[in-house]
Amino acid sequence: MASPDVLLKNEIQELRSKHDALILAHYYEDGAIQDLADHVGDSLALAQWGQRADNPVVLMAGVVFMAESVKLLSPGKRVLVPDLKAGCSLVDHSPYRKYLEWRLKYPDAICLTYVNSSAEVKAITDVCVTSSNAEKIVNAIPKDRRILFGPDRNLGRYLSKKLGREMILWEGSCEVHVLFSSRRLQELKLRYPEALVIAHPECDPAILAESDVIGSTSRLLDEVTNNRQRKQFIVATEHGILHQMQRARPDAELIQAPAEGSCACNECPYMKLNTLEKVRDALKGLSPEVTVRSDVQALARVSLERMMAITEGRPVEWPTTFKDPGLK
Ligand code: 13P
Ligand code: SF4
């Protein structure tokens, strides 16, 4: 008799075939969810796979803004999430009305918004970025234009310093990445002097200052996979990614960067809302489905498509000034 876990996975496989559904998972999901996905990736890769696939149904095991990106780029697809409550603190830190007020103060600037934002905020954005294409996008902005960057102040500050571009920053942050403790990281470095410290740019500057490699989740996974000289890595990002890292490098010792105190706070509570049961239920009932209002969709798509164009090396045009689109 098969175990309940095997029965559940079989059920998911049957439902996925029945609906010709594509299953996408972010690196921060539980290992069991990553293992049954068609693709596991960072925010940019997930959006690209979702857009390019022919499947009529896409299930995003990630957070809601990731599913919205797929919906915005492929409005004809039915995009499901296991749990609509899987939000993101950066989305919560950038409510539409406040972001609009900020945007209106600098109408001549080009507004860059991290994809970790709502569809409404993307609708008043000139170009979106993810942590893997942000440098390329900042470099594509004409040098004489002012830059607004939101909602992640740490990513913005990191880019501004690295690329030597001044930016007006929005004060938002990731509630998971800001919890890593630089004091405890310094102690770990003394204990593991041979270890390479790798960090996501959403971490505070004090953590980034202690890091050898800074990058998106896929960049950090590449480092662990390909840096064969190193056998120990201190990882300052969400715990779920250790699943792929350990699989790629069974010989390596992966040490999670600690938070202050003894909490499990380097787990994203939103990503961890997703479970295999909820994946099964979403495929069974074709719900919950992510929807975006048509007026928001039309505007938000422009900023995401501009991001995709620059990422793929295609030329883009920049608006000269910003006007309130009057969204209700
Ligand atoms: P990546 O695009 O690097 O996967 O980051 C997404 C995210 O939410 C990190 O907290
Ligand atoms: Fe948002 Fe942080 Fe979770 Fe990423 S880890 S989804 S930025 S709350």
Image: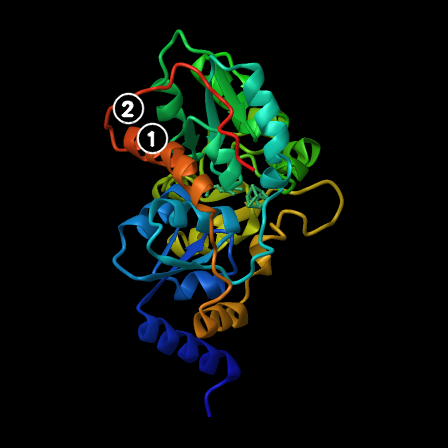
Q: Is residue 282 left or right of residue 265?
A: left
Q: Residue at x 60, y 56 (%)?
A: 85
Q: Residue 89's image quarter?
A: top right
* Label 2: element kind: loop
Expressed as whole percent of the image width and height from the top left, the position of residue 279 reads 48, 68
- Relative to 2, does residue 174 appear above or below in the rendering? above
Residue depicted at x 45% and y 44%: 231
**Left or right: 243 in relation to 19:** right
List the single residue furthest toward the bottom: 1
Kindly tell me whether residue 37 is visible in this rendering.
Answer: yes
Observer able to see residue 172: no
Q: Which mark is residue 306?
A: 1
**2 and 1 marks in contact (CB < 8 Å):** yes
Q: Quadrant of residue 10?
A: bottom left
Image position of 163 with respect to 90: above or below: above
x%, y% of residue 41? 39, 49
Q: Quadrant of the image for the C terminus?
A: top right
